[in-house]
Amino acid sequence: MGNSQNLNDRSLQLLKNLVERYIQSGQPVGSKALAQDFDAKLSPATIRNVMADLEELGLIYSPHHSAGRIPTATGYRLFVDSLLTVKPLAAQELSYLSQGLENPNDNTDVVAIASKVLSDVTQMAGIVTIPRREMACLSHIEFLPLSHNRVLVIFVTDEQEVHNKIIQPSKTFSPAELQQAANYLNSVYAGRSLSSVRDVLLTQMQQDHQKLNQGMLDAINMAKLALVDEQKEDYVLSGETNLMSFSELSDMDRLKQLFEAFNQKHSVIQLLDQCLTADGVQIFIGEESGYQAFEQCSLVTSTYSVNDEVVGVLGVIGPTRMAYQKIIPFVDVTAKLLGAALNPKS
Amino acid sequence: MGNSQNLNDRSLQLLKNLVERYIQSGQPVGSKALAQDFDAKLSPATIRNVMADLEELGLIYSPHHSAGRIPTATGYRLFVDSLLTVKPLAAQELSYLSQGLENPNDNTDVVAIASKVLSDVTQMAGIVTIPRREMACLSHIEFLPLSHNRVLVIFVTDEQEVHNKIIQPSKTFSPAELQQAANYLNSVYAGRSLSSVRDVLLTQMQQDHQKLNQGMLDAINMAKLALVDEQKEDYVLSGETNLMSFSELSDMDRLKQLFEAFNQKHSVIQLLDQCLTADGVQIFIGEESGYQAFEQCSLVTSTYSVNDEVVGVLGVIGPTRMAYQKIIPFVDVTAKLLGAALNPKS
DNA sequence: ATTAGCACTCTCCACAAGCAAGTGCCATTC
DNA sequence: GAATGGCACTTGCTTGTGGAGAGTGCTAAT
């Protein structure tokens, strides 16, 4: 019992229609309404029997004895996994999408635009993680002396992003020494990807110890301090306020929880990290996410890639009752366009 | 008619008690309840008469015929302007405040912490504008070549903040030329305040034209492109979600408007800019702000200064019914502590 | 297996009654 | 004449009732 094998085609078709109707209307769906979909081939009474089965399987439930039925998270899951017929993107949406994402702009700009596009088109919340900079190339590094022995490290990747960090080396350096160290690092490492730079930094000291002079060692040590850090993940969220318009999310306490999760970021990031593992579109429906704040929400995500390397996740957050048929292809296409827009070759 | 001169001491005292009671309870205040404050020196009937006067003057109103009275924005205004007795800060609040703000940290960190402190202590929303960098000193400037003639300008102020901007000079420079230009600018302008650098850049070209060689002119032109821009104002907001707990703000449409205003920033910035003109604590009560989204909110702000120069605004946003007696001194003190924390001399 | 019929359950709405809070007004008091 | 006590009145909130509507589950018939 409780296995979808039990379900014949008719039951599945019925579930499909029920979910579609509920997504459209937001009202519990009754047997009479569903019967209309079947051109009087099936009477309401029969449908009631089938619905009773579906309820027993945990796919649908009724909010009270004499209301229609509503899909459960499991019901939605079955729907998106096997029943759903995706709708191709409308032409105007596609043009709106590419219009925003195909202009060559600042990197962070593109990410922000993608997030905004996601929320604008869906009228829900859009989210895009900042692309991992592992594969970005180091183009320039610079050390500036601060007070109290501290050193401000500035490094630029891929002609675009500027990162900076304050480090505290164990010994004091003169401005000239810092300049030398930067010159050395720029000559040796510029043009290589950050991840390879990191790897080399970590191994070089042991291997080539004798070949290096003190200045080089100092430079390498400082670069390690600057580059080998936990890279703090982050994301750009837009259209959160759209979520305030859904009656499903009108409970203020829940909504507050949700917005606090958005602000604190860490649970959202954890959730998005799970999406990084599998390529392509992934979906969390309601309680599936495992986070209380997202209990009433669904999350449709996709990884996006630059040069076949996954660099981030993007997605749409909305109520569980969302038009999955449209959202899924939309998220998919947006991810591909964002990947393309981020590709430096263009 | 409608002039506060009409009011005798007793009426004012009554208004004061009424506002205080309403701030505490959130319930319309009736004549009977107010009578208790006066130790039976005044009967409810008398108080009713006085309240009728206050209502005619537009200082209070009743939500319906037979409820108690609630202060209007004008009533609150009179209260904060002339009736309010500020409460000194509780010791623990003060210690919490100084604990967070007295550690010498990153500049942007301090601003974020201040915002967080404001919201944590008040359980409302805290807001702090990013300090204007006019008076900050230029400590280092750097040009890096990008593709398509573009140049990435990085400049560091006051040993702390790193700013970067992509400019597009009219001619192409070699890396060596860029290095030279940066060297020249660093030798001449490092240590001077950004505003003075800007002034000099704008005038030097006319005045000392003959004394400068081409390289210097190029350097000055690029510096102008980088430094003479509209400085985009911004702020750090925290604890917005606290606002979701107030029943006064539980109307979802209004709340949505408010959060959208927070996200779009420009109307909030306009509002905060108004506070820059006058020193010290300023208050907008409800509709006084002139922005629909803030109709149900009050904003208590104060400018904060570094070296007697006003560099920003900070404040607290909450429902009109807030404990002004505590919030006002709290905002005042926080502003002073933030100013001190930002002072590079320490 | 499917269907028609029917009793049952539950929500929603409207309306009324009773209660509590508080007012406005008037006649009275000091 | 200002302050007060008394009283009728208004209003919102709560509770209860009753009917309409929607949808179900069960049973008997096809």
Image (spheres, coloured by chain):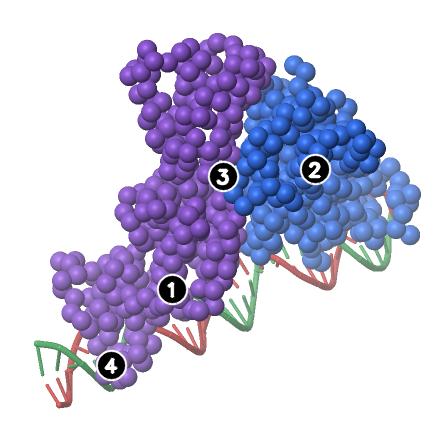
Chain colours: A blue, B purple, C red, D green
Q: Give whichever of B81, B226 is nearer the camera.
A: B226
Q: Nearer the viewer, mark 3 or mark 1?
A: 3
Where is A34 relative to B337, above or below? above
* Amino acid found under the numbered disc labelled 1: Lys
What residue sits right under mark 3 in the picture?
Answer: B159
Query: Mark on residue B43?
Result: 4
Mark 3 and mark 1 residues within 8 Å of each other at the beta carbon: no
Q: Nearer the viewer, mark 2 or mark 4?
A: 2
Distance in Å between CA atoms under marks 1 and 4:
31 Å
Give the mark nearest the N terminus, 1 or 4.
Answer: 4
Where is B289 relative to B168, above or below? below
* Amino acid found under the numbered disc labelled 4: Ser
What residue sits right under mark 2 in the picture?
Answer: A221
Give the mark nearest the N terminus, 3 or 1.
Answer: 3
* Residue A54 picture location, percent across and down: 82, 48
Q: Nearer the viewer, mark 1 or mark 2?
A: 2
State which chain disc 2 sits on: A
Query: Which residue is found at the position 60% from the left and 37% from the top?
Result: A173
Quadrant into which the C terminus of chain A falls: top right
Q: Give whichever of A346, B140 is nearer the camera.
A: B140
Distance in Å between CA atoms under marks 2 and 4:
81 Å
* Residue B82 picture location, percent across and down: 23, 63
Secondary structure category for the residue under label 1: helix
Can residue A141 be seen in this snapshot?
no
* Amino acid found under the numbered disc labelled 2: Asn
Q: Give whichever of A303, B65 is nearer the camera.
A: A303
* Residue A189 picture location, percent across and down: 71, 25
* Residue A151 picture location, percent across and down: 58, 39
Distance in Å between CA atoms under marks 1 and 2:
51 Å
